[in-house]
Amino acid sequence: MAVATAATIQAHLLGGTYPESTLDANNIFDYEQYTTRRRYPSCEVITTQPESTVETRRSTDTTVAFEIRYYDKNLGLRTDDVSTQREVENAITARMETMVLQDYKIVFDERKKEKKRIIIYACAELILSPVSWSGTTC
């Protein structure tokens, strides 16, 4: 069974259209950046639960979980920062909704979006997490 990885999700996100001066090929990563060397703005795709499989006589359930994190500096320009951040969030969500996360035999696909704002030294962290699914095959 072909299961999506952080690298395939990163490649899919690279094909998106984002607002100017936000995301491009140089700041979408398939690994977690060091906190002290983090680029702003940037996006990370992290595997939070590696592929796990539960097999029974009737079905095989495969579960994988990812987090997509978007980091942006909060410069105090509230209106522009919030609207730009919302546009990037919507673009990432739209790209993930168009992605096929598993092969054609999938019966159940679950995607969740959770938004957290953490202020760390005037930097806003957005965590879209977890994007997880479980597939049942016959």
Image: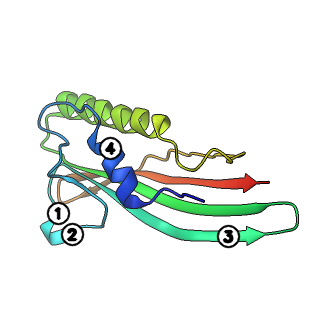
Type of residue at label 2? Thr
User: In the rendering, which numbered label is found on residue 35?
Assistant: 2
Q: Position of residue 117 (x, y in %)?
A: 35, 49
Q: Position of residue 16 (x, y in %)?
A: 29, 35
Q: Residue at x 27, y 36 (%)?
A: 85
- Of callouts 2 and 4, which one flags the residue occurring earlier in the amino acid sequence? 4
Relative depth, front residue between 12 and 66: 12
Task: Using the numbered discs, state the Cα–Cα distance from disc 3 to disc 2 in whole angstroms.
Answer: 33 Å
**Number of other residues with Cα within 10 Å of mark 3, as a class: few under 14, some 14 to 19, many 20 or more:** few
User: In what element is the residue under mark 3?
Assistant: strand
Type of residue at label 1? Arg
Task: Using the numbered discs, state the Cα–Cα distance from disc 2 to disc 4 in whole angstroms.
Answer: 22 Å
- Of callouts 3 and 1, which one flags the residue occurring earlier in the amino acid sequence? 1
Provide the residue designation for mark 3.
53
The answer to whether marks 2 and 1 mark residues whose Cβ atoms lie closer than 8 Å is yes
Task: Using the numbered discs, state the Cα–Cα distance from disc 3 to disc 1 in whole angstroms.
Answer: 34 Å
Q: Residue at x 81, y 60 (%)?
A: 59
Q: Position of residue 7 (x, y in %)?
A: 35, 59
Q: Is residue 117 visible in this depiction of the protein?
A: no
User: In the rendering, which numbered label is found on residue 13?
Assistant: 4
Provide the residue designation for mark 1.
38
Above or below: residue 77 compared with residue 57: above
Above or below: residue 53 compared with residue 61: below
Instruction: Point out the frontmost of discs 1 and 4.
Output: 4
